[in-house]
């Protein structure tokens, strides 16, 4: 590593609660010569809370291109810079990708300092399978494009996570209801803050909730994965009627499509976010042929 070149630190900051910050991030913020912040006023509050006094420079979506050139020059001259966003991890639906890309091209060290991100916080609390998931960011604002966007998500075989602004949440939920009314989902609002709220259920139920109580604060939506072969039992699943009979029928339906019993049990368990043993016990009387004994 060249000694005469600066380093770009990608620093994750709290998404709400100021205690959700790592000791390493605090040390880096106190050591660098300059902090590039999406909102200098918000970052200043964080720095003041931890008695860190460093110069700040704005870096947001409206000046990202021009400011990147300026910051790259500073890095080349040997200045260490910490990049922070309003909340969470820079580059994840926040400014940061452009300076990271150009720093890599210029062979400037890019050092990630991990920490909070609303994606993972919501994913872990939603209760859906986490072995594989897709983050879709913010969806389109245009209604027609939004419908195409949600249709793509509806066929995704893994848990899907997306962001939405509070004033657009009900419209997005309505589109989800129109396309997949029986798909379980969770809406995580104001994560880690005083008024944190996690609502789980069917799209229609969640629409009713936020119609009666208008949403405030940024929202994260987590949708259960699409699982081919479970259409006839989807309503029971969504309504939390996870009876042995419903689980058994789900396994039978998959086996009727040519899936072996062991794989069918695994797919049903993953789709519902429950243990394989629970599904196995419900389907214990199903023979390998897929036909129950009379």
Image (cartoon, rainbow, N blue to C red):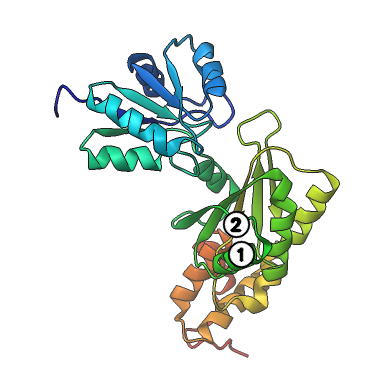
In the figure, residue 68 lies in which quadrant?
top left
Judge whether residue 7 can be spotted in this image. Answer: no
- Cβ atoms at labels 1 and 2 below 8 Å apart: yes
For disc 2, the marked residue is 140
Asked which quadrant contains residue 22, the reply is top left
Secondary structure beneath disc 2?
A: loop
Question: Vertically, is 145 above or below 82?
Answer: below
- CA neighbours of label 2 inside 10 A, class few (<14), some (14 to 19), many (20+): some
Q: Residues within 10 Å of mark 1 (few under 14, many from 20)?
A: few
Quadrant in which the C terminus appears: bottom right
Outermost residue toward the left in this view:
2
**Where residue 43 is drawn, which disc sits there?**
none
Residue 132 pos. (x, y %):
44, 58
Q: Could you say which is closer to the camera, residue 66 or residue 93?
A: 66
Q: Secondary structure at mark 1?
A: helix
Left or right side of 127 for 29: left
Read off the residue under disc 1. 145
**In the rendering, at what x and y percent does residue 126 appear?**
60, 49
Q: For the point 23% across and 33% down, which residue is it?
A: 108
At 59% from the left and 70% from the top, the residue drawn is 282
């Amino acid at each position: 590593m060249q000694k005469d070149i600066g380093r770009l630190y990608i620093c994750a900051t709290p998404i709400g609660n100021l205690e959700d910050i790592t000791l390493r991030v605090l040390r880096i913020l106190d050591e660098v010569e300059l902090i590039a912040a999406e909102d200098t006023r918000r970052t200043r509050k964080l720095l003041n809370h931890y008695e860190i006094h460093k110069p700040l420079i704005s870096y947001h979506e409206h000046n990202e291109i021009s400011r990147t050139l300026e910051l790259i020059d500073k890095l080349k001259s040997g200045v260490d810079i910490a990049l922070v966003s309003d909340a969470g991890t820079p580059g994840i639906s926040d400014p940061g990708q452009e300076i990271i890309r150009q720093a890599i091209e210029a062979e400037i060290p890019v050092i990630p300092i991990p920490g909070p991100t609303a994606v993972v916080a919501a994913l872990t609390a939603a209760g859906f399978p986490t072995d594989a998931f897709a983050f879709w960011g913010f969806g389109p604002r245009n209604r027609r494009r939004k419908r195409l966007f949600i249709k793509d998500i509806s066929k995704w075989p893994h848990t899907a996570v997306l962001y939405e602004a509070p004033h657009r949440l009900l419209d997005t939920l309505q589109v989800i209801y129109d396309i997949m009314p029986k798909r379980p989902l969770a809406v995580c609002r104001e994560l880690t803050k005083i008024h944190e709220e996690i609502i789980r259920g069917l799209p229609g139920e969640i629409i009713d909730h936020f119609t009666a109580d208008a949403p405030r604060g940024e929202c994260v939506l987590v949708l259960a994965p699409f699982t081919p072969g479970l259409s006839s039992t989807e309503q029971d699943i969504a309504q939390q009627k996870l009876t042995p009979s419903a689980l058994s029928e789900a396994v039978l339906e998959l086996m009727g499509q040519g899936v072996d019993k062991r794989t069918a049990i695994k797919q049903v368990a993953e789709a519902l976010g429950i243990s394989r043993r629970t599904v196995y016990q419900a389907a214990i009387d199903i023979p390998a042929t897929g036909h129950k004994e009379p």
